[in-house]
């Protein structure tokens, strides 16, 4: 019997797409209290934006960790990420099971071969149809250099560097939001290269991405960022599986 898409395979992607809402001002939201600008944090985020805008493409290894607050063990998945501007990316999951997430800059596909299912959605949208032009922001856009972070978030520098040459920047949404309570980036202090993204939702579930083994030399073929749905595969829309 064919399985149904569930949070077993989708927690991190659901959370990341939910993050698009953290910068969205709806009719009933109110601005969050503003802190005084942190000049050092602002300068670092400007460096992050400039660096990722300058990258035409890159590849990296990733580790994705989903940490539930109440029950269950951490779920750790690993694979390879390929990014090519504008807004194109491919996440090839290798362990503990093969799956792939592809964005062509407009549309997204998340395919789990074992489930014979593919989840289709829109990149840079909030799952309710709101485009980034109206205020929604998908943090995956930080990696592609297509986001203006400081238009949506206040930046605060972390007090303890997480490692040699690294800094952590907390991003505080400028609009109140009921889904995401915390978001931070770990970046190379000199270049601005993003080496980690961490978020926490309202229920206290934490999602962490770590990136290593960066490669910048070879331009990936455009065909990597298109996806053909295999015959016999069930198609599910992202809005159908949003909590």
Image (cartoon, rainbow, N blue to C red):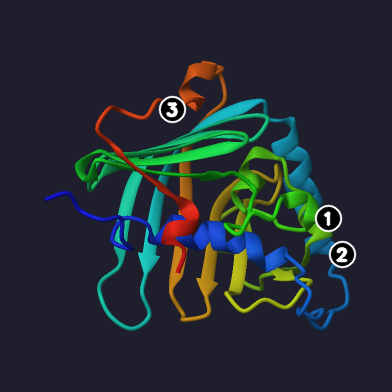
Q: Is residue 163 visible?
A: no
Q: Position of residue 36 (x, y in %)?
A: 88, 77
Q: Position of residue 125 (x, y in %)?
A: 64, 51
Front residue of this view, candidates 138 and 186: 138
Q: Which residue is mark 1?
A: 43
Name of the residue lying farthest toward the left = 1
Question: For the point 57% across and 75% down, which residue is it?
Answer: 179
Task: Give the Cα separation between the discs numbered 1 and 3.
Answer: 38 Å
Callout 2–callout 1 Cβ contact below 8 Å: yes
SS at mark 1 in the image? helix
SS at mark 3 in the image? loop
Which mark, by number, is residue 39? Answer: 2
Q: Earlier in the sequence, mark 2 or mark 3?
A: 2
Task: Give the Cα separation between the discs numbered 2 and 3.
Answer: 42 Å
Q: Which residue is mark 3?
A: 227
Question: For the point 51% across and 39% down, which residue is it?
Answer: 108
Residue 158 sits in quarter:
bottom right
Q: Position of residue 114 (x, y in %)?
A: 20, 42
């Amino acid at each position: 019997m064919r399985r149904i898409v569930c949070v077993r395979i989708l927690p991190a992607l659901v959370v990341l797409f939910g993050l698009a809402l953290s910068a969205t001002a709806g009719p009933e939201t109110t601005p969050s209290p503003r802190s005084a600008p942190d000049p050092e944090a602002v300068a670092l985020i400007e460096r992050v934006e400039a660096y990722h805008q300058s990258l035409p493409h890159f590849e990296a290894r990733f580790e994705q960790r989903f940490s539930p607050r109440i029950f269950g063990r951490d779920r750790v998945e690993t694979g390879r990420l390929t990014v090519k501007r504008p807004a194109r990316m491919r996440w090839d999951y290798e362990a503990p099971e093969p799956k792939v997430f592809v964005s062509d800059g407009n549309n997204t596909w998340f395919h789990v071969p074992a489930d014979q299912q593919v989840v289709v959605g829109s990149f840079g949208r909030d799952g309710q149809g709101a485009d980034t032009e109206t205020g929604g922001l998908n943090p995956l856009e930080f990696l592609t250099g297509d986001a203006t972070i400081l238009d949506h978030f206040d930046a605060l520098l972390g007090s303890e560097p997480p490692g040699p040459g690294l800094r952590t920047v907390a991003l505080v949404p400028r609009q109140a939001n009921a889904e995401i309570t915390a978001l931070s980036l770990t970046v190379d202090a000199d270049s601005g290269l993003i080496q980690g993204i961490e978020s926490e939702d309202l229920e206290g579930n934490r999602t962490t991405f770590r990136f290593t083994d960066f490669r910048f030399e070879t331009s990936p073929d455009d065909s990597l960022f298109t996806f053909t749905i295999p015959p016999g595969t069930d198609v599910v829309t992202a809005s159908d599986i949003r909590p």
